[in-house]
Image (cartoon, rainbow, N blue to C red):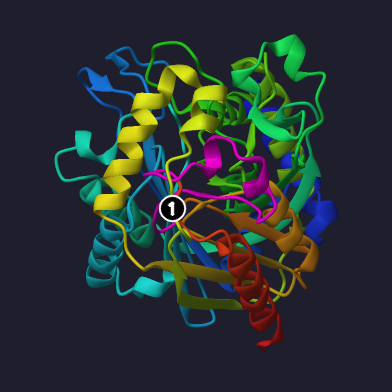
């Protein structure tokens, strides 16, 4: 008996326990009949966006070029339909995706599928081992739209379920407090960095939304985890740890269940120093599968969306903090001086900040923001959420750079230096937290 067949049998037994489907030779037929009558429809689409030639890897202040592929890059889409509403969730293996292009893609998706702009979210995985949108012929608009078109054509009755788990030891807060000021761990020798306390938390939770098709197989697995996609330090193109999880899930299941990664609040959270790809595959991939195997099926076919656009002020009195840069990252003074000057040339009084909440059923919701949100803010949003299961998703429908906690600015450090990567108000975190919690509460109050 091969692994695929064994897993199918185990899944039918699980379905019998979790849903009341009979565990007999007619289990598959019974499952198919029950799912055919399910109030949810779901479809998936996937487009390979792996470069075919040499590209510049994003996510590093130093120039890195390569054409070697370690783990392919994808644009993946999940469309969910219920109660007269459709939502499209797109995951994109790239460092970041600007608001103007995300809006253009969302408008074209609405034209092609009828899914409203406000019901579409496009989340960048933040892999540091892929090119920026500028390396692609049409800035990734076509593959994003095609993935959603495929998913919309693929709609069929499904059951959805949610679960959450925990993975210890894979992620860590990358900011440590040394003698009253904050350093990134990579700016200190590893042994020294370990002696100082972390400035903030690193959330070990992983949340999972799984879609089950008529055949009892997973049609899609969506997971949310807070960690920079930056373990891969080799000169290769790679989807980083989300790609490792995808491979592990496919290998263990014996078939290709589309696995979509929604980036958690990880502005100050990195892979634990020394963590390897196989660690993410086995520990995080294993936990995603364990969670998928014990999902709590969603009974109520509610799909609700709350979209709003906040205007967030720019940084108060921006300066180039040359002393802090020279102390903590002396080799990058010129780079961050140029980043500061470039940001000053395009500085605005305020910046649009789209926030989206999606509720599915009574106990699950996700809320998104277009920034690199510090982990403590994300954990606070989850703690205040009225839902049993909540995903906080960053790098979505835009890319406005780092949003530290208000207190983190006092310690300084890379994420607080004004420039192309950090330019919003020091109060941006409080605003996003307040509005995100309000979105979740409003979604919960709707019938």
Residue 252 in magenta?
no
Viewer can see residue 127? yes
Q: Residue at x 53, y 26 (%)?
A: 230
Q: Position of residue 106 (x, y in %)?
A: 31, 64
Q: Quadrant of the rendered structure where residue 70 is? A: top left
Q: Residue at x 43, y 71 (%)?
A: 119
Q: Is residue 164 left or right of residue 332?
A: right
Q: Which residues are magenta?
A: 396-421
Say above or below: 437 vs 206: below
Please tell me how many numbered marks the rendered image carries.
1
Q: Position of residue 41 (x, y in %)?
A: 51, 66
> Are there few (<14), some (14-19), or many (20+) residues within 10 Å of tag 1?
some
Residue 407 in magenta?
yes
List the residue tagged with mark 1. 318
Q: Position of residue 116 (x, y in %)?
A: 35, 75
Q: Residue furthest bottom?
A: 447
- Tell me the chief SS of the magenta region: loop
Nearest to the observer: residue 318 or residue 14: 318
Local SS, label 1: loop
Q: Residue at x 29, y 64 (%)?
A: 103
- For the C terminus, the image quarter is bottom right
């Amino acid at each position: 008996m091969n692994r695929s067949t064994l897993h199918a049998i185990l899944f039918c037994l699980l379905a019998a326990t979790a849903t009341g489907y009979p565990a007999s030779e007619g289990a598959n037929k019974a499952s198919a009949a029950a799912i055919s009558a399910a109030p949810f429809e779901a479809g998936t689409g996937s487009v390979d966006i792996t470069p075919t030639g040499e590209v510049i890897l994003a996510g590093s202040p130093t120039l890195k070029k390569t054409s070697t592929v370690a783990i392919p890059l994808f644009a993946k889409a999940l469309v969910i339909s219920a109660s007269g509403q459709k939502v499209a969730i797109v995951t994109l293996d790239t460092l970041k995706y600007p608001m103007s292009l995300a809006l253009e893609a969302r408008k074209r998706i609405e034209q092609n599928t009828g899914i409203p702009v406000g019901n579409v979210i496009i989340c960048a995985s933040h892999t540091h081992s892929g090119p920026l949108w500028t390396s692609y012929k049409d800035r990734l608009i076509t593959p994003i739209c095609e993935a959603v078109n495929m998913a919309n054509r693929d709609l069929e009755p499904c059951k959805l379920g949610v679960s959450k788990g925990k993975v210890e030891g894979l992620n860590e807060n990358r900011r440590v407090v040394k003698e009253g000021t904050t350093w990134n761990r990579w700016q200190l020798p590893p042994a020294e960095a370990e002696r100082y306390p972390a400035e903030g938390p690193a959330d070990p939770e992983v949340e999972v939304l799984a879609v089950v098709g008529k055949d009892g197989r997973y049609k899609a697995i969506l997971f949310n985890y807070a960690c920079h996609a930056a373990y891969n330090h080799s000169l290769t193109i790679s989807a980083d740890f989300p790609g490792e999880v995808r491979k592990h899930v496919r290998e263990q299941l014996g078939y290709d269940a589309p696995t979509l990664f929604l980036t958690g609040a990880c502005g100050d959270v990195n892979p634990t120093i020394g963590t390897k790809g196989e660690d993410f595959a086995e520990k995080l991939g294993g936990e995603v599968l364990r969670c998928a195997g014990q999902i709590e099926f969603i009974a109520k076919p509610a799909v609700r969306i709350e979209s709003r656009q906040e205007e967030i002020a720019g940084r108060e009195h921006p300066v180039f903090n040359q002393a802090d840069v020279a102390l903590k990252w002396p080799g990058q003074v010129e780079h961050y001086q140029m980043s500061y000057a470039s940001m000053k040339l395009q500085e605005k009084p305020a910046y649009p900040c789209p926030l989206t909440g999606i509720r599915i059923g009574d106990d699950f919701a996700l809320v998104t923001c277009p920034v690199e949100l510090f982990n403590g803010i994300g954990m606070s949003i989850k703690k205040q959420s009225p839902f049993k299961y909540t995903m906080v998703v960053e790098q979505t429908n835009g890319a406005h750079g780092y949003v530290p906690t208000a207190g983190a600015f006092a310690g300084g450090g890379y994420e607080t230096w004004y420039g192309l990567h950090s330019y919003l108000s020091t109060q941006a975190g409080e605003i996003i937290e307040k509005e995100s919690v309000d979105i979740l509460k409003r979604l919960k109050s709707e019938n």
